[in-house]
Structure formats: C-alpha cells, structure tokens
Amino acid sequence: MVNSVASNVNGKETLLRIRNFVAQNFSLARRRVVTDSDNLLESGVIDSLGVLELVTFLQQEFSLQVDDDELTPENFQSIQSIAQFVEQRRQLPQELAK
C-alpha cells in the first residue's frame, strides 16, 4: 500500500513535503542520505522529541489531528509510512461523507 501513496499526485506531494521537512529539521538527515524507506527511529534520524515536532508539522501542514493511539512506530518509522498515514487520514473524512 505504501507504493500506492507514491503513485498518485497527492501522495507524491505529501511524500515531498514530508521529505523536505525531515531534511530541513533533523541534523542527521542533513549529514547523510535518507531514503523514503529508511527507518527514521532506529537510525536515530528522529528521536522522541523529533516525533513531536513531526506530529506538529503534520497537524499544521495537512490540517490533521493525530491521536495518541496513532503515535506508533508503524505510522512514523519512515518517510513512506508517514506519507501513507497522512494520505489515509486525509481520505477518512471523504469516506465518512459517502
């Protein structure tokens, strides 16, 4: 399903915005190449405070509310997984309206 995020225009834009945020805001990401599938948590690119910064960015940039139970490694382990999470959350209101 991660690949489906990158295959649509909105998904690519989401991926790009998240990738740029990570590169600009986390020093380790500026010092080395970070791919969209790299585990940001295990590699130390993002720590627990970084997750909070990232959540604040996602909430402001994409007008999302991120609940505590959504703060899981599966949702925040890589740029791809973060983009997938954002796209799923953005589609949720549309699905509820149907």
Image: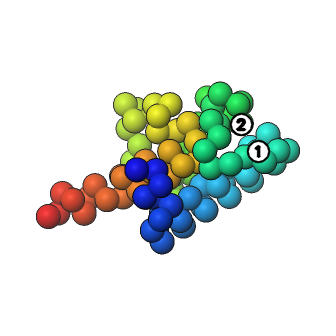
| Alpha carbon distance from label 2 to label 1 | 6 Å
Residue matched to label 2: 45
Query: Can residue 86 be spotted in the picture?
Result: no
Q: Position of residue 65 (x, y in %)?
A: 39, 48
Q: Residue at position x 62%, y 49% from top?
A: 36
Rendered image: mark on residue 29: 1
User: Which residue is most to the bottom?
Assistant: 9
Do labels 2 and 1 touch, CB within 8 Å?
yes
In what quadrant of the picture does the C terminus appear? bottom left
Q: Going by the image, does 27 lie left or right of 69? A: right
Judge whether 70 appears above or below 94 on screen: above
Q: Position of residue 1 (x, y in %)?
A: 40, 50
Judge whether 66 appears above or below 7 on screen: above
Counting residues from the start of the chain, the first of labels 2 and 1 encountered is 1
Judge whether 67 appears above or below 18 on screen: above
Nearest to the observer: residue 17 or residue 11: 11
